[in-house]
Image: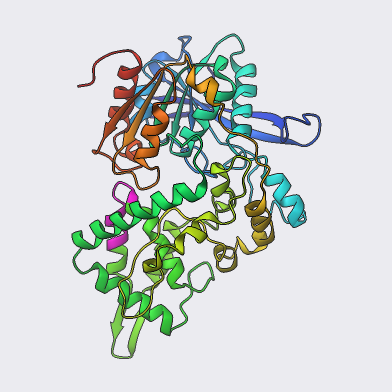
Amino acid sequence: MKPDIVLAGVLAKKHTFTLPLNYQQPIASQINVFARELCSTENQDKKLPYLVFFQGGPGFAAMRPASNSGWIRRALKEYRVLLLDQRGTGLSTPINYQSLKHLSPAEQAHYLSHFRADNIVRDAEAIRAQLCPADKWAILGQSFGGFCVMHYLSAAPQGVSEAYITGGIPSLTRSGDEVYYATYQRVLAKNKAFFQRFHDAQHLVTRLANHLIENEVYLATGERLTVEMLQLLGIHLGMEQGPEAVYYLLEQALVRTPQGEYVNPLFLNHFCQLLDYNTHPIFALLHEAIYCQHTASQWAADRVRAQYPAFNYRQGKPFLFTGEMIYPWMFEQFTHLRPLKAAAQLLAEKSDWPDLYHLEQLKHNRVPVAAAIYSEDMFVEMHYSLETAQQIGQLKYWLTSEYEHNGIRIDGERILDKLIQLNRGIALR
């Protein structure tokens, strides 16, 4: 392996593959898909199997590693790691409002419909056919990456030697509405825990919310900051170290002077860094579509929210954060989502999404699968994950309350090691 980059204890090589946008019409439009291959310096001359990593999302590129640490350190002991920039992300023909501006809304929606887990897996198999056609490889999926793993086991298990999932076992049959009914309950619980833990947080955030109602405040990216946008910070309440980040930001939000009160520019800048809808539009455009099989989402999170009026803030009432939900108003309030509003509506109305999971194939699955299920996960309902686990052959799981949804980012070496032990039949310690 001739590396393009040498990191601390890791050699990295870049790969770019030209692949079909639509595998039903492979000679038509093409896209580029980027992957970064990692190998430890001590194993550079060894022939090792690949472990392919599917990032969470949808719509986020694979991590950019800086050293041999975390789950990568554990993986590189026996694999070459392939960090896949899923189509439309990172260096894989990235999607944004500029890259789509030459298309009509209908053309944008049609183009974007090819960026779900099914085509991500087709890309992976096409890459395997070029990198190691005679060999199977292992796969690891975090969050939405676990949805990709489950589709892989449905559609192309012949390419997989073993599979790992962290915080991402999807329901195989439940609708987006059912998912969000459960998710709102989780978000309510996370709000309760947050405001109990940080005793002045409710005071801080209601002061800020009221200020936003009474004054026009603009973010560093140019949008007017609204209460609804402020509520979106709740996505971090379900992450390791996320509640702390939100609280410390709220502490600095308002500045009092003899001339009056204003929102700290530092807050406005950091707020933009904590919410990435402008820079990762696939997440907003296709998030609800990851649950759709022959059904339209019809803005499921927004419709289900109507059953939880406590999330609609009014002055004099308690403030609640929302979570991993996409709302139609986001395509009016976020600058880089506005040009995609019509396409987003068409995607929300799209009802002919193909199946993502083959229930019979999964029932008789023979690929060893090990999964970490986080009992306190705000993003993936534990009971639905356990329900799915009973429907998959050869799946073993580790149920734990030790971690939040992004546990692999915090303690990845330990988590992946435990899952490898599960797949190898070694008792967990």
Rendered location of residue 240, percent (x, y): 30, 46
Q: Is residue 245 magenta?
A: yes
Display coloring: rainbow
Rendered location of residue 225, percent (x, y): 47, 72
Give, as a single range, the part of the protein colored magenta: 238-247
Q: In the picture, residue 402 is in which quadrant?
A: top left
Q: Decide: is 21 above or below 43.
A: below
Rendered location of residue 385, percent (x, y): 39, 35
Q: Residue at 44% across / 26% down in the picture?
A: 391
Query: Is residue 69 at least partly visible in the picture?
Result: no
Observer-nearest of 32 and 45? 32
Q: Is residue 26 magenta?
A: no
Rendered location of residue 428, percent (x, y): 23, 20
In this picture, residue 365 sits left or right of residue 29: left
In this picture, residue 27 sits left or right of residue 278: right
Query: Is residue 319 at least partly visible in the picture?
Result: yes
Q: Decide: is 236 above or below 257.
A: above
Q: In the picture, residue 269 is in which quadrant?
A: bottom left
Q: Residue at 72% across / 51% down in the picture?
A: 108
In this picture, residue 62 sits left or right of residue 202: right
Q: Residue at 65% across / 51% down in the picture?
A: 347
Observer-nearest of 235 and 310? 310
Observer-nearest of 332 and 177? 177
Q: Main secondary structure of the magenta part?
A: helix
Q: Residue at 59% across / 20% down in the picture?
A: 156
Q: Decide: is 419 above or below 34.
A: above
Q: Decide: is 220 above or below 48.
A: below
